[in-house]
Structures are given as structure tokens and as C-alpha cells.
Amino acid sequence: MLDVHRLRVFRSVVASGSIGAAAANLGYTPSAVSQHVSALQRETGLKLLARHGRGIRPTAAGRALAAQADGVLERLGEAESMVADLRAGRTGSLSVAYFASVGSAWLPDVVRTVTTQFPGVRLDLELAELIPDKTEDRADLQVVVAQTGFDPGSGFTAYHLLDDPYVVVLPRSHRLADREEIELAELADESWVDNDFARGWCRRNLLEACTAAGFSPTFHVEAHDYPTAVAFVEAGIGMTVLPELGTVQLPRGTVAVPVVRPTPVRSIYAVLQDAVAHTPPAMAALEALRQAAVASRAAVVAA
């Protein structure tokens, strides 16, 4: 394999017209330049320079190699520039996976932050409720719901964003609507509206809490998401229990009341690949998620 540095020195000699001129342009001694050229000739097995009067000129082989060197050095320069851009987060891509209930709430802030700070970075967004089993199928950054202290696996680090307690959403005309809190067991005989079509961890967490309270809820209506379930509640079809973050913008005809004894809580994490953890876009996306989580909690408290 040709030594790139020797190729650069040789190309400078051809362009400068002499060993001395190339040495002056490169900031080397003439002896150092001669040594590099001699080493390149041994490396290639070719005579690259010939004396011409008091100077030198490239041989036919030298001219051919110099022409090829131009393309090689240009592509190498492009590669070096790309590496510098990647290190600075100016180009490349970042894949982000998220679950449905934080998509509209958090992702706009994350996308705006990354695309504003790093306009050359392509964001690949994916809706995913679960972490893929195969590490090669995972996103660079994924927002997930998991149990406290879960292990994201080798090569990944989990960053806790917030703990999100569950509430019951009721019509304002409901007999329990003016309560400050409601025991979960008091809801056993209510008309339940399901809100988790994916049957993910959030729903399993709720069912475990109901079991702990001594009952299994009977779902009379199935909705695919939180907004639809809340709309059903406003229509007087039933009540629904969901994480508090899903109640930031409730319809006027509904009210959210904390459930207790027990209070289901979902923990939300950002899972980041260690390989990209120190890249500027990934760091910016993680910080944007943290700020979005804080803002969401503040909005719930204010409501």
C-alpha cells in the first residue's frame, strides 16, 4: 500500500519543479524531501523523477502516478473533511424511536433542537413501543417505558427522564369527579374505556395495579390511543385510567383525579447507544428530551 504522506511530498515536487522548491513550500529540508521521494520509488519499484539540466522532471511513470495522486489526495481530503464534520455533528444521521404518547408532546422539541443546531444531520424517526431484541435493530436513541432500574443491555445506557403516575379521567358529572383522589378499588365496577391498543407495558402496569387492588377491570370500549379514550369519556361512555402526562389538554367536560392504593407509575427513560453518546447531535437530542420531560411535568402541575 502506498504511503499517502510520501505521495503528497512527491506531488509537491512535481508541482514545484524541484526538490528545493518543494522543500520550501512544505517547510521541510531538501534532504527530507529527497528521502521521501527515494522511499516512494523503492515502494513502487518505479523511477519517478529524472534529471533535466540543473533540475528534475517526472518520468512517464512519474507523470502517471502524479495524475492518479491528484484524485487520491482529493478523495482523501473529502474523507478528512467528512470525519471532521461528523465529529462536530455537522453531517450524518441520528435515529430516534419513541412511543405514541410522547410523540406529539416531546418529539417536536427534539426535532427542532437537532435540526436547528445541526442542519446537516438527517433524523430517522420511528414509532416503537418496545426495545428490539437484536441490538442491530435498535435506534441510536429510544424513548421507552420500563421498570425502575431496568438494564438496557450491553452497549446502551438508560437515562431516567421522569416517573409518571396514573390518574382516572371522568366526566365532570360523575359522582367521584370532585374528589381529590380515588382509591383504585373504587373503580372496579365502573365502565372502563381501554386506551392502549398496543397492549404494551403501560397497560400491563395498570392491570398489575388493579390486581393488587383486588379486581380485574372489564373494558367495555376499546380505544387505540389516549386522546380517543378521553373523547369517549367526554361523551359519557365510561371512564379511563392513564398516565398523567396524557391529560395535559383535557376536554372541558372531563376531569383527571389521581388514583391511590395503589398508584400505578410508569418510568420513562431515554436509551442511548454508547457508540454515539458523545456525538453533538445525540447529546443535544438527549438534553432536549430532558427539557421536554421537565416542561411536561410543569404543565401537568399547572393544570
Image: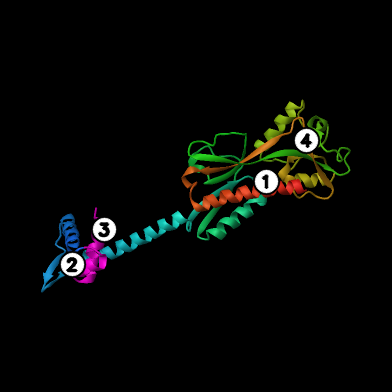
- Direction from residue 262 to residue 142 in the image, left or right: left
In this view, the residue in front, 109 or 35, is 35
Q: Amino acid at mark 2?
A: Ile
Please tell me which residue is depicted at 80% across the width and 45% down the height of the picture: 232
Residue 109 location, quadrant: bottom right
Residue at image mark 1: 101
CB atoms of marks 1 and 3 within 8 Å: no
Tell me the element at label 3: helix
Q: Which residues are magenta?
A: 1-28
Residue at image mark 3: 5
Residue at image mark 2: 19
> Percent from the top left, x then y, of residue 81?
40, 60
Q: Is residue 254 visible?
A: yes
Question: Who comes first in sequence, dot 2 or dot 4?
Answer: 2
Q: Amino acid at mark 1?
A: Ser
Q: Is 134 above or below relative to 27?
A: above
> For the residues marked 2 and 4, what is the alpha-carbon distance in whole angstroms?
84 Å
